[in-house]
Amino acid sequence: MSSERVGQSHGNSATATAHASGKSIDETNRNAEEFDKMLDRPENGQSDMQYYLELQRAMMKEQQAYTALSNVIKARSDACLSAVRNFKQ
């Protein structure tokens, strides 16, 4: 019964990680589309400034998504390592 719970727990965390990864990939694709749209805008000083601010904002969001995903994966890895260490004792 204990091994069933561990398997279910592992499956849920893997699903959550895959789901978070999918969201991150979707957001990256949306950012790329927005970037392409920004390239089609007319060139003048004001629109250039707006373009770079929007690009910076998009890059910050993407960085936050990757950081969050990295933290989730690290926590999951640390939990698995802790469980393995407990079995060895």
Image (cartoon, rainbow, N blue to C red):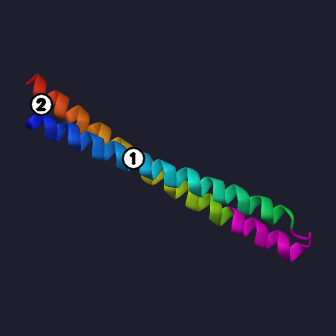
Horizontal arrangement in the rendering, residue 58 relative to residue 40 (left or right): left
Asked if residue 70 is positioned above or below residue 80 in the image, the reply reads below
Residue 81, picture quadrant = top left
Mark 2 and mark 1 residues within 8 Å of each other at the beta carbon: no
Horizontal arrangement in the rendering, residue 55 relative to residue 4 (left or right): right
Asked if residue 42 is positioned above or below residue 69 in the image, the reply reads below
Residue 54, picture quadrant = bottom right
Please name the residue shown 12% across and 30% down the image.
Answer: 86
Q: Which image quadrant: the C terminus?
A: top left
Q: Which residue is mark 1?
A: 17
Magenta-colored span:
41-55
Task: For marks 2 and 1, give the one nearer the viewer.
Answer: 1
Q: Is residue 66 magenta?
A: no
Label drawn at residue 89: none
Q: Where residue 10 sits: x, y (%)?
A: 26, 40
Please name the residue shown 53% across and 53% down the image.
Answer: 24
Q: Where residue 13 sits: x, y (%)?
A: 31, 45
Q: Is residue 48 magenta?
A: yes
Residue 34 seen in the current view: yes
Q: Amino acid at mark 2?
A: Asn
Label drawn at residue 86: 2
Q: Main secondary structure of the magenta part?
A: helix
Q: Amino acid at mark 1?
A: Thr
| Number of other residues with Cα within 10 Å of mark 1, as a class: few under 14, some 14 to 19, many 20 or more | some
Number of numbered discs overlaid on the protein picture: 2
Q: Where residue 65 sits: x, y (%)?
A: 50, 56
Please name the residue shown 22% across and 44% down the image.
Answer: 9
Horizontal arrangement in the rendering, residue 65 relative to residue 31 (left or right): left
